[in-house]
Amino acid sequence: MHITGRIATLAATTLTASGLTLAAPALAADPPIAPYAQAAAQVNANGTIENSKNVTDVTKVSTGKYCVRLHPDINAARAIPSATLRTTADWRSEIYANVDSSTCSAHPNSIYVYTGKNGAAADEPFFLLVP
């Protein structure tokens, strides 16, 4: 057993008045399977990350505007990102990704993702892939 397993086991052990109680540790989400991607993310409409690989942060800067920060080993300025809406997005939605945007200037090494609906900004869930 490695250290992470020991910590999880210790965290799941509680002492009660009747004795020692063991509970199953809460498991973190499985990392995505994206062997040929440098970075990938499944992002909710509110900007929270559902699952990711080499994505360190997502900042929702305003309605439908997201800065997806990549791991420092990946150069966002040289990336060729691909973004797509998730199936829970409105069917009239649209999505755009950009590596050169002043919107993300406060969030270095980020890819700008813009989602909208009927020609106006709207919060929509999306996937982002950097091959």
Image (spheres, rainbow, N blue to C red):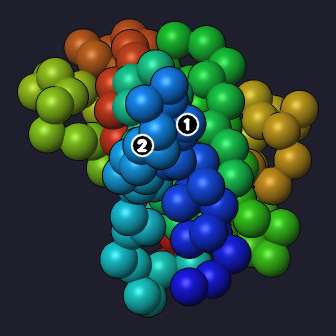
- In the rendered image, is residue 46 in sight? yes
- Calculate the distance from the C-alpha at mark 2 to the C-alpha at mark 1: 6 Å
- In the rendered image, is residue 80 in sight? no
Q: Residue at x 56, y 58 (%)?
A: 8
Residue 45 in percent (x, y) is at: 39, 24
Comparing 107 with 102, the one in front is 107
Image quadrant in which you'd find residue 15: top right
Instruction: Describe residue 102's horizontal placement relative to residue 17 as left or right.
Output: right
Q: Amino acid at mark 2?
A: Thr
Image quadrant in which you'd find residue 70: bottom right
| Vertical side of 45 occupied by 62: above or below | above
Asked whether the beta carbons under mark 2 and mark 1 sit within 8 Å of each other, the answer is yes
Residue on which the image places disc 1: 15
Q: Amino acid at mark 1?
A: Leu
Give the crowd class for mark 2: few <14, some 14-19, many >=20 residues within 10 Å.
Answer: few
| Vertical side of 21 occupied by 122: above or below | above
> Considering the numbered disc 2 on the image, is that residue within a helix, a strand or a loop?
strand
Instruction: Describe residue 129's horizontal placement relative to residue 10 as left or right.
Output: left
| Vertical side of 19 occupied by 108: above or below | below
> Considering the numbered disc 1 on the image, is that residue within a helix, a strand or a loop?
strand
Instruction: Describe residue 66's horizontal placement relative to residue 78 as left or right.
Output: left
Image quadrant in which you'd find residue 109: bottom right
Residue 11 in percent (x, y) is at: 59, 48
Residue on which the image places disc 2: 21
Residue 88 in percent (x, y) is at: 16, 31
